[in-house]
Amino acid sequence: MSDHRAAVTSPPADLDAVTLWTAREIAQQPQVWRELASYLDAHRSLVDGFLAPLLARDDLRIVLAGAGTSAFAGQILAPGLARVLRRRVDAVATTDLVGNPHDFLAEDVPTLLVSFARSGDSPESLAAVGLADELLSDCHHLVLTCNPDGALYRTFGGDAGRGRSLALLMPAGTNDQGFAMTSSVTCMLVAALTVLGGFRDAGLLADAAADALPDLEERARALVAGGVDRVVYLGSGPLGGVARESALKLIELTAGRVVSYFDSSLGFRHGPKSVLTSGTLVVVYLSNDPYTRCYDLDIVSELRATLPAERVVSVGCFGDPDEESWSFPALRHLPDAAVAPVLLLVAQHIALAQSLALGLDPDNPFPANEVNRVVKGVTIHGLDQ
């Protein structure tokens, strides 16, 4: 088993050299999750010393903030963390927080701002922490980032972060060099689940991912081989954030040439279902919650009655692992947010396979820099405007 898992940390041999970074960063995820678990275990006293007094406060508000993929991490985590912590947990994109700070920081209550940031250099990420400190009288910061040289880590990491803030650095190699966030976002998800939600099963996630990765690559290529003109991702609750991130991954790696949509299993019928064509692929994420899963399975059955069966794929921990069902049964007992890192591997492989099928370079789908890996061109305005 150990030899097998070591093997999947390298990109498949048949991929062209231009995909080296993206393929490697997808494949390395089981390994870096294990490294992350060891790092967090070694720093548990430091983390607990910072978080325990805050989480003991009944009036503490937790805000999960990031931009793009990092924002979707917050959307995946917020419902489950609110349930576990029995307190208010809000997912607020930094792009919303910076654009409308008086709305999203309207209540001057004790706040823990959790910043998710691959590079730590995005203009909105830096502005968000400044605005929170400016508008709130009691604000603490937890920074989850992948870049030791980024502005966020330089500001809050090491000795600079003592007191009202703590910065946790994801394992080396997670500051993805490929265009799209892959191992970076899943590591930040696992980190937040661990330090805020008491999650201790990173090894189980790594085992499930390592066992599935070789098959995922082959199945993803077969899935897009017949031609896909658009992809719809559906998920409920925390898996709604997974659906949204999945849709973004496809747009990014195909440079927008394959349009993708996202919605909830119930919400899709209320208008968005209009996007379906004979060339549409639908991926439905199945919840581990038995009640929620009823609605997920209902939309799967409905769509398979109108689309070719192979065009409607269910992904989750229940169901037979056949051509139309991608299953991770070892994770059935986990909450949906905890399963999310493994489910995202499916979306990453579909996006990679579709990018290659179009003859694109997944590491650099925008060679003319129409879209940048780290956002540029944002002017941050002062509150006195």
Image (cartoon, rainbow, N blue to C red):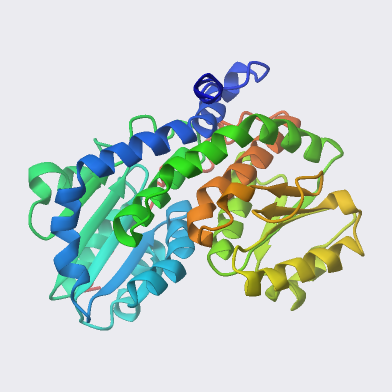
Q: Position of residue 148 (x, y in %)?
A: 25, 36
Quadrant the C terminus occupies: bottom left
Residue sitting at 31 percent across and 74 percent down? 101
Q: Is residue 21 above or below residue 171?
A: above
Q: Position of residue 63 (x, y in %)?
A: 32, 68
Question: Does the rendering let one see residue 382?
Answer: no
Q: Quadrant of residue 141?
A: bottom left
Residue sitting at 69 percent across and 75 percent down? 267
> What count of labels does the image hold?
0
Toward the viewer: 167 or 191? 191
Q: Position of residue 157 (x, y in %)?
A: 17, 45
Toward the viewer: 37 or 240? 37
Would residue 137 appear left or right of 193 to someone viewing this image?
A: left
Q: Position of residue 71 (x, y in %)?
A: 44, 59
Residue sitting at 58 percent across and 42 percent down? 345
Quadrant the N terminus occupies: top right
Toward the viewer: 96 or 110? 110
Question: Does the rendering let one see residue 87?
Answer: yes
Q: Is residue 185 above or below residue 135?
A: above
Residue sitting at 64 percent across and 70 percent down? 290
Would residue 374 appear left or right of 115 to someone viewing this image?
A: right
Toward the viewer: 299 or 139? 299
Would residue 74 appear left or right of 26 to someone viewing this image?
A: left
Q: Quadrant of residue 131?
A: bottom left
